[in-house]
Amino acid sequence: MTMNIAVIGCTHAGTAAITQMAKLYPEARITVYERNDNISFLSCGIALHVGGVVKDAEQLFYATPDQLAKLGVTTHMRHDVLAVDTDAKTIQVRNLVTGGEFTDTFDKLVVTTGSWPIIPQMEGIELENIVLCKNYNHSKTIIEKAKNANRIAVIGAGYIGIELVEAFEQLGKQVTLIDNMERILYKYLDQEFTDVTEQALVDKGITIATGETVTSFAGADGRVTTVNTTAGQYEADLVVLCIGFRPNTELLKGQVDMLPNGAIIVDNYMRTSKPDIFAAGDSCAVHYNPTGQNAYIPLATNAVRMGTLVAKNLMKPVVRYLGTQGTSGIKIYDYNIASTGLTETAALAAGMNVKNVTIVDNYRPEFMPTYEQVTLKVVYEAESGRIVGAQVLSKVDLTQSINTLSVCIQNAMTMDELSYVDFFFQPHYNKPWNLLNQAGLQAV
């Protein structure tokens, strides 16, 4: 009896799950439904493409329907799943090209429907040249429209927004960055880090409007001309919305357990509250180690890991998910920045009793011909000393230190333990007491 596996959605989590399942269960019948005309697009590369670093957007795809077909997978592109019945194990599908509808059945269902940008419902949102930034077609639209735009407003100062702002500035555009929080990159970095970053953007002539909420858009001849906020108005002939994402999980509403925002709750083996229904990627909540709670953290890295685990655990629970720290990095002009876990701001907002150590030092001995300053901040619980978050910023690339601290958080290590971990010393790279050891020692 052949096992029927249906997969809905094929970006990072879907592609990872499908390629692994094809290898692990060669006898199974795997059917993929994807409403777009492409799969596996690395949206984190959009800003690099806009800025001309990646010349050819085709390089941002890492799998094709043909490659999946070689693995024996049937991929239905431009097919929209309209409904899922998790008890009857059926799905209702529409072919977007012909308009025809049909029903399919499954033994196992993998929901990797991803997320979609949040679109604020407000006056003027339907004007032309207000665009989203998520998939391949968006990236083509942004590049086309940016050619003829001089004033570009980016709304949302998260990673995607910041990277686009830098790309647009390097193309010679006049750029305004608008965000309703008091500072940029609010979710990822504390103020010591965002102050430096904001200054780097301002030095390039970028207008930063933080602490302002967009209220409406105005236009002429159906095209946007102005962005109105709670504190002013900004001229723009192109607006890119990067406000954030919400999970695409309408299909399973009321059928499996979810967070209030619609993110599907899965266990350590990627199983939903219904047996035989698995989920991974941006459609899901993840187990967030710094707090021990479920959280919504849409990242490509999480998606690929979770998709791979779906395949491993499809028949029986074998490999446990280790949770996530939400580790991420970004390069802004000359600065290499990375963070993991909770910022001090977020930890205090969550009611945690935390302390922090912030070290500003040269990353290697001053007797070397050159040396750069580095800022490292580690946040930890006051009582236990358990590490819950860290951030680093410097002109030399020390971002890997944040991967190290991610491992520390995952393993619930304390500042005491960090003080004496065995790290190498070599004058080309660091000082006799490694920066991470120093942070631990200062806390103790």
Image: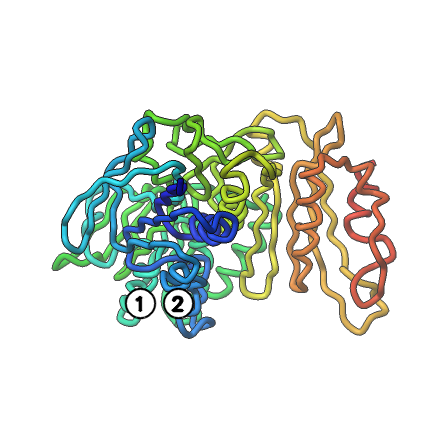
Q: Residue 237: x percent and y percent?
A: 26, 61
- Residue 383 to residue 301: above or below: above
* Mark 1 to mark 2 CA distance (whole Å): 9 Å
Give, as a three-letter code, the residue at label 2: Val
Snapshot quadrant of residue 408: top right
Query: Residue 384's image quarter?
Result: top right
Q: Nearer the viewer, residue 103 or 26?
A: 26
Residue picked out by circle 2: 50
N-terminal label among 1 and 2: 2
Residue 195's tag is none
Q: Is residue 245 visible?
A: no
What residue is drawn where x is 52% and y is 47%?
308
Is 121 placed above or below 399 here?
above
> Seen in the image, is 182 located left or right of residue 360?
left
Residue that carries the numbered disc 1 in the rendered image: 146
**Quick one: which residue is furthest to the front in this view?**
1
Which amino acid type is shown beneath numbered disc 1? Ala
Say if mark 1 contacts mark 2, CB within 8 Å. Answer: yes
| Circle 1 SS class | helix
> Please, is residue 431 above or below residue 272 in the view?
below
Horizontal and vertical percent for residue 437? 81, 47
Question: Which is more toward the observer, 28 or 17?
Answer: 28
Q: Where does residue 220 sit, x and y in percent of width and height?
A: 15, 58
Residue 2: image location, x then y, percent: 40, 43
Residue sitting at 38 percent across and 60 percent down?
Answer: 69
Q: How many marks?
A: 2
Of residue 132 and residue 150, the one placed in the foreground of this image is: 132
Q: Residues within 10 Å of mark 2 (few under 14, many from 20)?
A: many
Q: Residues within 10 Å of mark 1 (few under 14, many from 20)?
A: many
